Image (cartoon, rainbow, N blue to C red):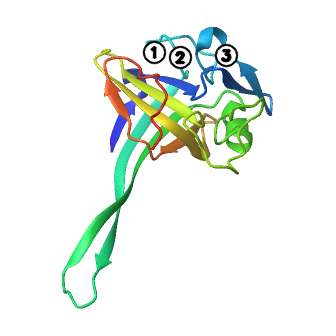
Amino acid sequence: MVYYLGRDVAIGLGTENSTIGITAALDAVTVTAAASGTAMALGSGSAGLVSVWPSVDDVTGVDVGIGAMDEDITYFGIRSVTKAEIKKETTVSITRKKKDSEWDTLYNDARYGVSGTSQAWPGLEEPTATHGYRIFIQLKSASEVLSVPNCCVQSHTVTVNADGVSEETLEFMSYVTPYIATTCVTGTTNAF
């Protein structure tokens, strides 16, 4: 697990579909055509360091966790136990200052990204390589970019302090191995 302060990274957030994207505002999700062949991204912020994807503004922290789930396999008549890796999981938690209801709407209406149609994917069918979100985490030193493909929204929390300042956290989860490169990895995920 690694934790970055918002001032140390730039976050880009887009869909996996190269022709359509999602805009979430005012308690409604709109699926629209993407411009110039790149998926549209959530957030209306400036381009930041991740120049192809609009960035998430007012980020206070990013928590990245990479883990694996093992299962113990026992054999009848043998005293040894075999550990078998079942799946790998990557979680990305983005915390920002709450300024609108965009992430509330995203969590309630578009957790799984877009399908190949003009609506948000409800998650009731087998996913393909074009389902979900892609997250880019770029160090401000511009030395490397972590690209996490095929993410879905796992949770959304809002924190209200006594000062009246509120933050919100959107947690994404993916079972696809992330890419670490010097630029954003935007290619389609390989089918298994």
Amino acid type shown at disc 1: Val
Quadrant assignment for the C terminus: top left
| Distance between the alpha carbons at the discs numbered 2 and 3 | 12 Å
The residue under the point 26% across, 68% down is 83
Q: What secondary structure is found at the residue carrying circle 1? A: loop
Give the residue at mark 2: 53
Q: Residues within 10 Å of mark 1 (few under 14, many from 20)?
A: many
Q: Image check: 122 left or right of 185?
A: right
Disc on res. 34: 3
Q: Earlier in the sequence, mark 1 or mark 3?
A: 3
Q: Nearer the viewer, residue 159 or 139?
A: 139
Which residue is at the far front? 192
- Is residue 26 or residue 84 the one in the foreground? 84
Examine the image and state in which quarter residue 56 appears: top right
In the image, is residue 191 above or below residue 21? below
Q: Nearer the viewer, mark 1 or mark 3?
A: 3
Secondary structure state at the residue bearing disc 2: loop
Q: Could you tell me which quadrant the N terminus lies in?
A: top left
Residue behind mark 1: 50
